[in-house]
Image: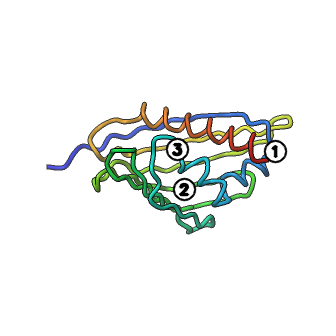
Amino acid sequence: MSKPTIFSTFTVERVYPAPPSRVFSALSDPVKKRRWYAEGEGFVVDSYSLDFRVGGFERTRFRPVGGPDMTNDGVYLEILPEERVVFAYSMTIAGQPLSSSLGTMELRREGDGTRLRYTEQIAHTSGIDATADRIQGTEELFEVLGKELETHP
């Protein structure tokens, strides 16, 4: 018998002291994106690729140290430079489907900086509502993005 699908939506916002062009560059440049997105403490990155264009893919193969293999496979659906990025992605853990999501990042100039508003709509296909974990992970990623913008102008 299949596991029930659980649906959820959340939004996370951050304001960065950098113009939209720099924030967009951190989202679109493969070297920068890998640094803040894929190379987290406590994780081993087995492979990472980014083809940042409409129809292009982002693929990550990783695992927590001592943990199971995980995948994150996404496709870019809409890209408006320095304004909006829409993508769909799915995750697996130990080869089993975990979730599929639609993510939207909106960039708006705010003073000398940029407000990033991220909204994710999730179908949790593992039968477990992991929304709280996804929110926490997203918030942690956006903190790392902030450090990327500070240390790599």
Q: Which quadrant holds residue 12?
A: top right
The reply to whether dot 2 and dot 1 touch (C-beta < 8 Å) is no
Q: From the viewer's perspective, is 36 left or right of 149?
A: left
Residue 60 rendering spot, x and y as whole percentages = 47, 58
The residue carrying mark 1 is 19
Q: Report the front residue among 125 and 140.
A: 140
Q: Secondary structure at mark 3?
A: loop
The residue carrying mark 2 is 87
> Please, which residue is most extreme toward the left here?
1
Residue 139 is tagged as: none
Within 10 Å of disc 2 (Cα), the crowding (few <14, some 14-19, many 20+) is: many
The residue carrying mark 3 is 40
Residue 51 rendering spot, x and y as whole percentages = 59, 67
Q: Secondary structure at mark 2?
A: strand
Q: From the viewer's perspective, is 110 left or right of 55?
A: right
Which residue is at 60% across, 41% downward? Answer: 118
Residue 26 rendering spot, x and y as whole percentages = 69, 51
Which residue is at 42% across, 44% downward? Answer: 122
Within 10 Å of disc 1 (Cα), the crowding (few <14, some 14-19, many 20+) is: some
Query: Could you tell me the amino acid type at mark 2?
Result: Phe
The reply to whether dot 1 and dot 3 touch (C-beta < 8 Å) is no
Counting residues from the start of the chain, the first of labels 2 and 3 encountered is 3
Query: Could you tell me the amino acid type at mark 1?
Result: Pro
